[in-house]
Amino acid sequence: MRSDSIVEAIGNTPLVELPTFSPKPGVRVFAKLEGHNPTGSVKDRIARAMVRKAQAEGALSPEKTLLEPTSGNTGVSLAMIAARLGYRFTAVMPDNVGPERTELLRAFGAEVVYSPGAEGTNGAIALARRMADDAPGRYTMLYQYGNEANPAAHYETTGPEIVADLPEVTHFVAGLGTGGTLMGAGRRLKEHNPAVKVIAAAPEPDDRIQGLRSLEEGFVPPILDLSRLDARMMVSAKESFNLAAALLHQEGVFAGVSSGAVLAAALRAGRRLDSANIVCLFADGGWKYLSTRLWTRSYEELGAEVEGKVWW
Ligand SMILES: Cc1ncc(COP(=O)(O)O)c(C=O)c1O
């Protein structure tokens, strides 16, 4: 497909069936492969939408710096889009993330500021807030957790793409991070067919799955309206790792750890149904998680190496 620029090449990702994961003949499972976006994740969609919204509101100028607390994919997407559209970008992230992430952000032209690793993404959010407060007028914080352009991007792009490729969709399953994917694509799919069920995959409270958050930690993103979810399923890190590996081995689909969690939730729902067309949203590809070796070792073999750690 031809595009005027890389920013226009975001979206229109493939929807592929996963026949070997079908729990019974009438229940079909499909995956929307967001790793096919320009910087390799679903976050390209919202980064473009948030920067365009800020532009339209006059909140951006070449003197201002975009600021975002992000532990990963959103930062890389914003770094690329800010650079393409002519803005500076500073990412605030925990200091215990892997080296690939810092290198990638810098490669795309971003400045990186570290927050204490032990405080996780909440620490990065607090530090970014302080930076913005301490230097009035210097930064524009997009804040994906509270920015309506986040769900709107999914309402305008992800949702319609699924409807176009699979009008008979009955269930939509996505990971719960900011909630943007679930809210935006979910709303669009329910407009198409009010019977569509929207299911969130979230980590079990003590587990860490990159990109996903447990609401039990106490923070509910402002854009997330829990009443618009039909179900929220808790998935363990072990199940997520195992299914991410199985996806590659059974289907040749190389997706990240949160995609394993999404597939786990989809299969749990699918086993209870007699007929369904379940769409799973796989937020990114497996590249950033290669160093876990999850595709060539069992979870038990990885053991303490992966338990409790947040992988890039
Ligand atoms: C790898 C990964 N999976 C899932 C998600 C969740 O998406 P959302 O923020 O739209 O809830 C994110 C982003 O937070 C992510 O980076």
Image (cartoon, helix red, strand yellow):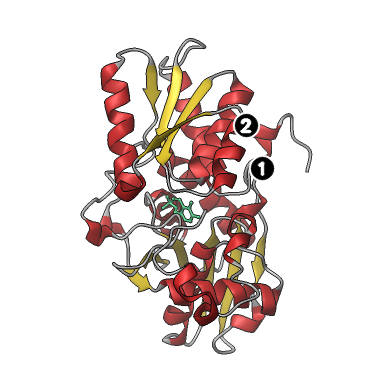
- The answer to whether one can see residue 146 in this image is no
- Residue extending farthest right: 2
Against 242, is 202 above or below? above
Nearest the viewer among 145 and 94 is: 94
**Rendering coords of residue 60 (x, y %):** 45, 16
Please name the residue shown 60% across and 22% down the image. 85
- Closer to the N terminus: mark 1 or mark 2? 1
Q: Is residue 142 left or right of residue 20?
A: left
Query: 10 Å neighbourhood of mark 2: few (<14), some, or many (≥20)?
Result: many
Q: Secondary structure at mark 2?
A: loop
Q: Which mark is residue 108?
A: 2
Nearest the viewer among 139 and 170 is: 139
**Rendering coords of residue 193 (x, y %):** 44, 62
Q: Is residue 225 left or right of residue 103?
A: left
For ligand 1, tell me if the residue under mark 2 lies within 8 Å. Answer: no
- Residue extending farthest top: 63
Against 291, is 273 above or below? below
Q: Is residue 237 left or right of residue 21?
A: left
Q: Of circles 1 and 2, which is in front? A: 2
Please name the residue shown 61% across and 61% down the image. 291
Residue type beneath disc 1: Pro
Q: Which mark is residue 38?
A: 1
Cα–Cα gap, marks 1 and 2: 12 Å
**Rendering coords of residue 57 (x, y %):** 40, 18
The image quadrant where one finds the N terminus is top right
Q: Secondary structure at mark 1?
A: loop
Against 118, is 275 above or below? below
Query: 10 Å neighbourhood of mark 1: few (<14), some, or many (≥20)?
Result: some
